[in-house]
Image (spheres, helix red, strand yellow):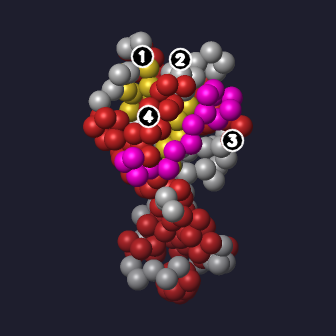
Amino acid sequence: MTDILRTVHIVDDDEAIRQSVGFLLRKAGYAVQTYPAGTHFLKSVTRETRGCVLLDVRMPDLDGLEVQARLAQSGIALPVIMLTGHGDVTLAVRAIKAGAIEFLEKPFERSALLEAIETALAHAARSDREHLAAADALVRLAALTPRERDVLDGMVLGRPNKLIAYDLDIATRTVEVHRANLMEKLSARSLSDVLRIAFSAGLGETAEPA
């Protein structure tokens, strides 16, 4: 059974491209799904869809850039490899700025296509790991008391125990107790572990050290 994480979604209105590229990729060991239009693809994918997308930039209903934009609006983080037969540099720049992993001009070399797909799938794997880490971190943080969260916020800002105690109007020893408790609940052995968990959960993204 082919790994669904190594699925390539081919979105192209050219049937010959869908068939030839699909055949090449299946022979190379990938699972392949093909779609004749961007609208068909958008109706089929969800946030749970895995793999990457080969997306033709020029299609009669929705062009590739519009499909790419709608994926982002829907929170679907599939890596995109944009395809074109027109060599349009402006579209290439727009696609990359919008988050495309690669931009390939038809006809493309087999090696270039496979390299782009491997890059896209590696990107997807990293994204999946980051999402799992974030979900795990949020579960761990949910076990903390409000005061432990306050102490954690101070740690994320790089504040020493004495300054956290001053900010919260509590004794330094109390901060130390809360710090020990939250580290135990987070299964953290060091400050680095605590910060890694906090950052995975999105803490400190907009905060600035005092």
Q: Give the mark, 4 or 2, whose residue is nearer the N terminus.
A: 4
Q: Which residue has dot 2 on it?
A: 58
Q: Is residue 154 visible?
A: no
Picture disc at residue 44: 3
Q: Is residue 39 above or below residue 43?
A: above
Q: What amino acid is at disc 1? A: Gly
Separation of residues labelled 4 and 2 (CA atoms): 17 Å
Separation of residues labelled 3 and 2 (CA atoms): 20 Å
Q: Give the mark, 1 or 3, whose residue is nearer the N terminus.
A: 3
Separation of residues labelled 1 and 4 (CA atoms): 14 Å
Q: What amino acid is at disc 4? A: Val
Dots 3, 4 in contact, CB < 8 A: no
Q: Which residue has dot 4 on it?
A: 21
Residue range of the region highlighted in magenta in the rendering: 27-41
Q: Secondary structure at mark 3?
A: helix
Q: Quarter holding the C terminus?
A: bottom left
